[in-house]
């Protein structure tokens, strides 16, 4: 049985006891325990069920690599599924329940699946759920949905809070083991700012458990001293319980800090997501011990040898009283020695190497431990815990030579460097034949924008598994990172680390080497997803030769541990089945995060009222006080109309349109996107983004532009102003600012990364006000300042100056067809300038107007609106905007796509004007019906309404729509049957309903 020892337990406080429950059963542990160590101390060997066969599962590891011990934690508003017992720190009142079983952990109906394993091999779902087709909706889909997932989804709103934290550092060190500490100290000595992250609650990694000396002193003392040195350095930040989650381009990394998981009653955020920019990153993430593949290696009580050592040394817990240990390397003997010295009976050490081990083996033998070289585990017997072990020759098929009784098994298959973070951003790996593992290739690191590496690996994560070698390697990494970050490293005497020398391991991917099929079909690779050695071999026989294909066919490495224990063994089995070396098979793709992070941490503060904050212009409060009827536009709130007294919204809109056409109107246009594009290649860049030429635009002038995506479809439009030779200001639609900014950055970072162009989103830095109508110039002249005459400021020009004492930039552009100016001032001056315009405009009949009046006036002029006339399938040519497509340049985004046959089809619907024969308003989105039905039995359509309004200017309904062969059908009438039961008749007309020659806007 597993139990608490009377000795050891360096991390626990035996003077205190804390209560917790598992599956409703009250249990007790000590401060410093993890949930896993506390469960083992209470002899709770079985902690869950596997996903596919619902086999009993016990704790197999002691850290983030644990695939089995996942539990539902908490209750109600604090409930969270799939929490790892091995990384969950015990606290008083903790409640946990096991997962993936019904009705109970001990008796699970799903356990019947293990008896059907021959009918449920790898990839069975790809074959089984195909036929009969009628079963999918009524049988297969409900069954799959019921079976999917491990834990339960929370039902109540999360009671905890979360936050994001942004920081910049010169050197980021991920991993607080012996190598991470040494690398951080070396880098910090140069004066560089260093941020050191450690995912556990303590420093030093495995070194205090594995032992050794540094400069003749115990390694624990060295750790205490170096941590104290780092804490005393002003340029060093230390964070425990903070996992390095991912490494991305441009020195960007994510850290995941668990702030109060172990202190649930403490107020404050539960988790913090660190968003880090670092000049250099050092991954000192250690190594993970590999399991051995033998029949029954999933029975509760079978555990990694290093994990068993951890539970003894750190928590004073032994997983069994009679233990058999299987190994292919000398490190396994450390566990045998540790157990024996703790008073645990180690029955046998089975060393797969025919010659056995070295000094550590002799030390174990001197303690009276029996050692059998050349032997292996043929099979572990037991259901819910280990009962017996069959011993066989490693060079055989599995014939049992002996059977011994035991209650736990330790296995050690060698060590794999944790290369995940190195690989996240493109770092390549090489195969280390001597240690049988993949390790970082220093010649092919993750590359920054300048083509040089920005990530270094150190210590065990770099394949340096010995204490002395890890310290030396880490110091070199710290120096290299500091130098690359622009600092001068200091030379200092390196500490000398010493541990017992080890003989080389012998790669063992299967026990015994030629195990017959009955044993292979019970030898597990992926404990959570129930992937066996025989499954991978079956995938190879069925033609899945790519490791990525095999992964998806078998689900190897697709569990919540992302294959931390299973991947290398699975790769080796696949390579053997394909008759090729492991490097030729390669690895699967490592993706962030390194371990799962909470959804709350990803969201941070973005929840409830601040999930999507409402954006307000500087004039928002003025609008609210003057009758604004609000309309959501993207994340903004814009006045739809300004309602006065008892008038309806419709009446307010009519009034605003008429007043703007006859006198002067004021529009808050601050929400329009404003992107500064700057650099020597700015013109070249904009030529590729817009369909027309922007590089030929003169400073002081503006040009309307269209922007298409790579598929040729129109995505945004707006006016571009050239500020100087290297600077442009691009206006976007209100809802498009962030999207277009991201679009620009994507192309700059992925395609044209060597162009000298920089983009800044300054949308909220400026208030922009449209002064529109016949009296617009008179109003601005009354305020005084810059010359706004037609000669000084012609149409499609801009100028800087002062208006009414305000520093301003005036654009002579129009979206209404009237004489119009758009005036930009600093956001802090927006309300004051707006107020000054309102006061000065009283003599000219000034009124503010909202978005609906804006839309009506632009429709009267035949101007398009992104999102109305476009829907993601429309190209500029459909809208009659061929004039805005340059014939002088060779390329722009979307040009090749627009040359495809479907895009050039003469039968594509074209934008036209529509007038109802009775003056009524067409319903928005109505389709024009044609003759007959299509192949689906639906009535043929020949056009649809994109924009439709009542025009106060014309006193009738007007509309625009896309119509089949529209330009050649001018004057023809179309029928629009609608959902209200009416059929509207509309005539195809020119889309410009008002001032076609533009005389009003050009005055």
Image (cartoon, helix red, strand yellow):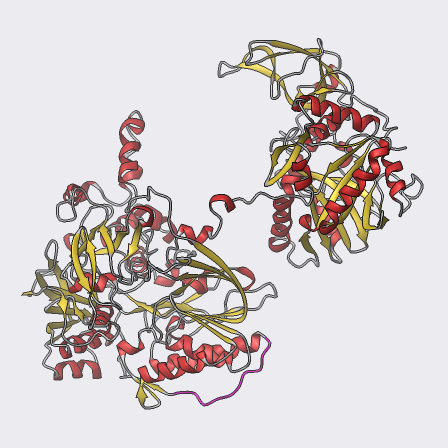
Tell me which segment is drawn in magenta.
486-495
Instruction: Give the left or right position of residue 810, taking residue 636 as reference.
Output: right
The image quarter in which residue 516 lies: bottom left
Out of 527 and 631, give the one closest to the viewer: 631
Residue at (66%, 59%) from the top-left corner?
754
In the image, is 56 to the left or to the right of 813?
left
Residue 515 seen in render = no
Is any part of residue 505 visible from this angle? yes
> Residue 133: x percent and y percent?
31, 26
| Rendered-image quadrant of the C terminus | top right
Majority secondary structure of the magenta segment? Answer: loop
Between residue 195 and residue 580, name the one nearer to us: 195
**Residue 992 in the image: above or below residue 178:** above
Residue in view at x 71 percent, y 49 percent:
827
How far across and down, in percent of the image, does residue 171 sit?
52, 72
Quarter of the figure that contains the N terminus: bottom left
Side of 234 where 38 appears, left or right: left
């Amino acid at each position: 049985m597993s139990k608490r020892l009377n000795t050891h337990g360096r991390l626990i406080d035996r003077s205190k006891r804390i209560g917790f429950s598992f599956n409703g059963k009250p249990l007790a542990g000590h401060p410093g325990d993890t949930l896993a160590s506390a469960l083992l101390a209470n002899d709770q060997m079985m902690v869950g069920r596997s996903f596919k066969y619902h086999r009993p599962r016990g704790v197999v590891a002691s850290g983030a690599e644990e695939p089995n011990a996942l539990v539902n934690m908490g209750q109600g508003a604090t409930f969270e599924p799939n929490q790892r017992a091995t990384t969950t720190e015990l606290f008083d009142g903790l409640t946990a329940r096991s997962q993936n079983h019904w009705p109970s952990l001990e008796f699970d109906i799903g356990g019947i699946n293990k008896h059907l394993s021959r009918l449920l091999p790898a990839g069975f779902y790809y074959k089984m759920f195909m036929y009969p087709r009628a079963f999918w909706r009524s049988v297969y889909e409900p069954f799959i949905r019921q079976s999917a997932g491990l834990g339960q989804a929370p039902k109540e709103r999360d009671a905890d809070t979360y936050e994001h934290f942004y920081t910049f550092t010169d050197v980021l060190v991920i991993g607080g083991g012996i190598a991470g500490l040494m690398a951080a100290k070396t880098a910090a000595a140069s004066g560089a700012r260093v941020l050191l992250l450690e995912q556990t609650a303590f420093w030093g990694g495995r070194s205090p458990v594995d032992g050794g000396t540094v400069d003749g002193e115990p390694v624990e003392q060295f750790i205490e001293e170096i941590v104290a040195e780092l804490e005393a350095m002003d340029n060093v930040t230390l964070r425990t319980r903070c996992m390095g989650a991912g490494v991305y381009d441009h020195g960007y990394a994510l850290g995941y800090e668990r702030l109060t998981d172990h202190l649930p009653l403490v107020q404050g955020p539960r988790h913090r997501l660190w968003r880090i920019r670092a000049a250099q990153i050092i991954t000192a993430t250690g190594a993970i011990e590999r399991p051995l593949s033998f029949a029954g290696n999933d029975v509760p009580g079978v555990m990694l040898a290093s994990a068993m050592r951890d539970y003894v040394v750190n928590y004073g817990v032994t997983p069994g009283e009679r233990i058999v240990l299987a190994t292919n390397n000398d490190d396994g003997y450390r566990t045998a020695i540790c157990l024996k010295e703790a008073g645990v009976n180690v029955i046998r050490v089975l060393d797969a190497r025919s010659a056995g081990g070295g000094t550590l083996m002799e030390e174990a033998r001197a303690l009276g431990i029996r050692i059998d070289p050349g032997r292996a585990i043929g099979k572990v017997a037991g259901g819910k815990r280990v009962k017996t072990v069959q011993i066989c020759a490693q060079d055989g098929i599995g014939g049992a030579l002996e059977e011994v009784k035991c209650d736990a098994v330790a296995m050690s298959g060698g060590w794999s460097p944790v290369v995940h973070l190195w690989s996240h951003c493109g770092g390549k790996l090489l195969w280390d034949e001597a240690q049988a593992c993949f390790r970082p290739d220093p010649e092919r690191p993750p590359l920054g924008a300048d083509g040089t590496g920005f990530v270094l690996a150190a210590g065990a994560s770099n394949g340096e598994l010995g204490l002395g070698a890890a310290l030396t390697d880490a110091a070199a990494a710290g120096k290299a990172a500091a130098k690359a970050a622009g600092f001068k490293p200091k030379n200092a005497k390196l500490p000398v680390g010493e541990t017992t020398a080890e003989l080389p391991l012998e790669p063992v991917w299967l026990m015994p080497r030629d195990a017959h099929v009955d044993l292979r079909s019970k030898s597990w690779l992926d404990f959570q997803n129930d992937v066996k050695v025989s499954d991978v071999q079956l995938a190879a026989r069925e033609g899945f030769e790519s490791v990525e294909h095999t992964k998806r066919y078998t689900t190897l490495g697709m569990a919540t541990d992302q294959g931390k224990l299973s991947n290398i063994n699975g790769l080796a089995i696949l390579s053997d089945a394909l008759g090729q070396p492991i490097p030729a098979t390669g690895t699967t793709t490592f993706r962030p995060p390194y371990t799962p992070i909470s959804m709350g941490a990803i969201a941070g503060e973005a929840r409830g009222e601040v999930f999507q904050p409402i954006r307000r212009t500087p004039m928002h409060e003025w609008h609210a006080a003057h009758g604004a009827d609000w309309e959501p536009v993207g994340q903004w709130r814009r006045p739809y109309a300004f309602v006065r007294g008892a008038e309806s919204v419709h009446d307010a809109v009519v009034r605003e349109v008429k007043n703007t056409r006859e006198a002067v109107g004021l529009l808050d246009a601050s929400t329009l996107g404003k992107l500064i594009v700057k650099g020597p290649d700015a013109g070249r860049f904009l030529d590729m983004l817009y369909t027309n030429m922007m590089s030929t635009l003169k400073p002081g002038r503006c040009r309307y532009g269209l922007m298409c995506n790579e598929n040729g479809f129109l995505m945004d439009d707006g006016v571009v102003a050239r500020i100087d030779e290297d600077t442009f200001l691009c206006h976007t639609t209100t809802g498009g600012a962030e999207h277009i900014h991201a679009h620009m950055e994507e192309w700059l970072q992925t395609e044209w990364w060597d162009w000298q162009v920089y983009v800044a989103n300054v949308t909220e830095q400026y208030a922009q006000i449209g002064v529109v109508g016949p009296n617009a110039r008179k109003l601005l002249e009354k305020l005084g300042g810059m010359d706004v005459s037609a000669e000084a400021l012609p149409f499609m020009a801009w100028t800087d100056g002062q208006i009414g004492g305000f520093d301003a930039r005036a654009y002579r552009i129009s979206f209404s067809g009237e004489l119009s100016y758009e005036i930009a001032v600093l956001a802090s001056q927006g309300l004051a300038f707006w107020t000054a315009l309102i006061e000065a405009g009283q003599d000219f009949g000034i009124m503010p107007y909202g978005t609906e009046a804006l839309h009506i006036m632009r429709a009267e002029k035949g101007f398009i609106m992104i999102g109305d006339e476009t829907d993601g399938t429309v190209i500029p040519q459909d809208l009659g905007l061929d004039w805005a497509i340059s014939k002088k340049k060779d390329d722009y985004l979307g040009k090749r796509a627009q040359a495809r046959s479907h895009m050039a089809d003469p039968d594509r619907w074209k934008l036209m004007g529509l007038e109802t024969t009775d003056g009524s308003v067409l319903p928005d989105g109505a389709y024009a019906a044609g003759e007959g039905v299509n192949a689906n039995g639906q009535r043929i359509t020949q056009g649809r309404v994109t924009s439709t309004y009542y025009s106060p200017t014309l006193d009738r309904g007007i509309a625009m729509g896309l119509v089949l062969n529209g330009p050649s059908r001018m004057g023809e009438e179309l029928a629009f049957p609608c959902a209200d039961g009416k059929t509207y008749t509309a005539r195809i007309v020119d889309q410009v309903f008002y001032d076609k020659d533009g005389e009003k806007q050009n005055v």
